[in-house]
Amino acid sequence: MKPKPIFNNPYYKGSGKLMNKVAIITGGDSGIGRAVAVGFVKEGATVVIAYYNEHKDAEETKQFIESLGGKCSLLAGDIKDTKFCDKIVEETMRKYGKIDILVNNSGVQYQQKSLLNITDEQFDLTMKTNIYSMFYLTKRALKYMLPCSSIINVTSITTFKGEPELIDYVTSKGAIVGFTRALATNLASKNIRVNAVSPRSILDSIATCLLGSKQNSNSWFRCSNGKSRSTLRNSAFIYIFSKFRFILCYWSGNAY
């Protein structure tokens, strides 16, 4: 991608907000997931990154995290597969003995100009990747999450604004909002926080595929100070963990 996404804010200094915490981040090899992983590590967390098959991206993320003095484990597999979800949780518990934070970030989108162009197979794939996997992994991780743990689900601004060429994607992201609200109320008595982050588009591989042909795509995805928005969002994930039982963060326009 040109320009390459900026996933690290060199001016951001951690203050130990997540010291000794263990976080699972799906899709942590790139985009929002990578920025969140870096932000968590700066705050003292150990991260377990689950990703599909982008091995080069994952290794680059791991090397960067280790250059910061952080700890990072990589697990490759299909998040739609319940056996892989089992593996993520089992490997995390085997290696680190606990799960403090779960960030459900993995997702796919496929642009279609009409509902009639969305095949049953595409709809099924989108839903299974974006919402089924979230259910699968959360259910398995929850068995080991203690009071004051946190679950953070990544939805999308398209849930609230709509997107005419991403009908199945928007449907799945709307389901994530409902899942988050229901689970938050369900787990409130156990003092396990469930939050949703609703980003606007950023410069990442999914967005590039969708809008790469637009002449103004670079400026649309970048802030006036030249930073990719994903570097600014990692602070939101950290803030959510440290402050709230439930909050739905909504980004719009350029007020970052």
Image (cartoon, rainbow, N blue to C red):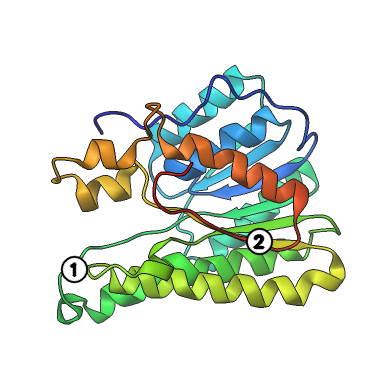
Label 2, label 1: how many angstroms apart (C-alpha)? 31 Å
One can see residue 149 in this view: yes
Vertical arrangement, residue 66 with respect to residue 193, above or below: above
User: What amino acid is at disc 2?
Assistant: Ile
Residue visible at 83% across and 55% down in the picture = 148
> Taking 161 as reference, is 88 left or right?
right
Residue where numbered disc 2 is placed: 247
Residue type highlighted by circle 1: Gln
Left or right, residue 50 beside residue 16: left
- Local crowd size for mark 1, using a 10 Å CA cut-off: few (<14), some (14–19), many (≥20): some
Q: Earlier in the sequence, mark 2 or mark 1?
A: 1
Helix, strand or loop under label 1: loop
Task: Work out whether 154 lies above or below 169.
Answer: above
x 51%, y 37%: residue: 232
Q: How many numbered discs, if any?
A: 2
Question: Could you tell me residue 15's position as x and y percent?
Answer: 76, 27
Provide the secondary structure element on which disc 2 rests: loop
Decide which of 109, 24 is in the foreground and name it: 109
x, y percent for residue 109: 31, 61
Residue 220 or residue 28, whichever sits in front: 220
Residue 112 - label? 1
**Residue mark closest to the camera, 2 vs 1:** 2
If the image is split into quadrants, where does the N terminus sit?
A: top left
